[in-house]
Image (spheres, rainbow, N blue to C red):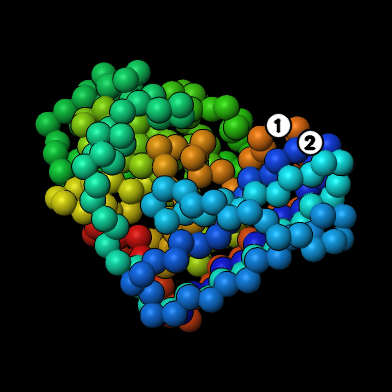
Amino acid sequence: MKRTASTRIAARANAGTRLVFAVAAVRDPGYEAFAEELAVTVDGRPVEPEEIADHHGGRFHVVDTAEAADVVLEYRAEVAGLARPAPVDAADLIRYVRPSRYCESDKLLPTSYAHFGSLRGEELVVAVRTWVGAELAYVSGSSRGSDGSVDTLLARRGVCRDFAHLVVALLRAKDVPARLASAYAPGLRPMDFHAVVEAYVDGRWVVVDATGLAPRQGLLRIATGADSSDTAFLSTVGGSLTLRELKVDAACDEELADPGADVLVELA
């Protein structure tokens, strides 16, 4: 399998803004080949961003603007082969069962037990994915950046991050470690960065996508964390910015068809 991914981000940053991009695909040691290009300009002048390692192979690319400036990032990657199974870390099995900013599993514990109380393991994961997919409507622009899983459940609508937050919260409420991953998603329409869930089941991390909008076996990992606060494609430390352009693309040289929600697959 060969996948390509690219993004272009343009923003107007105010003076004293640190821009933190999380758009680079993870360089997994299992890939047969990995090539990428990253270019950043500030007011049309090329700059070299600082690369900082994040959890689970993710990478931040950081740019500082002393004065107000137009910042443009362009990224492209070509990846051949499949990633190795995600490693299992004992600390992650604790970290990712705790409530987090956007996944209030403590508040949704009664809801999770009411709907899924007798279910465990693979059966639980499939049931949660199916229930969330049926209960929520995918509506572009319907949620706020501050919405968490409780807000999503009440609104009964959202985008991929909202679907993922609710799945994570319901699984954690049943003591299943679950985390959010951002990814390039060949086959996704409309094309954008995609948010999915990784749940720990029977000794491995499997992908759960309640939106069903893209084949899971084609996903290309970018960032991984407790919720979308850990996986945002662009954030700021000090200062502020106005996003002016976001273009994302992803493709695969194989025709992909998701095997169905009841078949568990890993992020590759």
Neighbours of disc 1 within 10 Å: few (<14), some (14-19), many (20+): few
Residue drawn at 71 percent across, 65 percent down? 39
Q: In whole angstroms, how far apart are the C-alphas of marks 1 and 2?
A: 7 Å
Identify whether 180 is placed above or below 183.
above
Identify whether 136 is placed above or below 147.
below
The quadrant the C terminus occupies is bottom left
Identify whether 163 is placed above or below 117.
below
Residue 134 visible in image: no
Where residue 92 appears, as percent x and y from the top left, is 28, 41
Element on which disc 1 rests: loop
Residue drawn at 87 percent across, 60 percent down? 44
Report the amino acid beneath label 1: Gly
Residue 16 — which label? 2
Total labels drawn: 2
Residue 49 — which label? none
Along the horizontal axis of the image, is 85 left or right of 232? Answer: left
Residue 238 — which label? 1
Residue 24 visible in image: yes
Query: Do tag 1 and tag 2 residues touch (Cβ < 8 Å)?
Result: yes
Residue drawn at 22 percent across, 23 percent down? 114
Closer to us: 59 or 106: 59
Where residue 254 appears, as percent x and y from the top left, is 43, 80
Q: Earlier in the sequence, mark 1 or mark 2?
A: 2
Where residue 57 appears, as percent x and y from the top left, is 42, 56
Report the amino acid beneath label 2: Gly
Residue drawn at 52 percent across, 54 percent down? 59
Identify whether 163 is placed above or below 252.
above
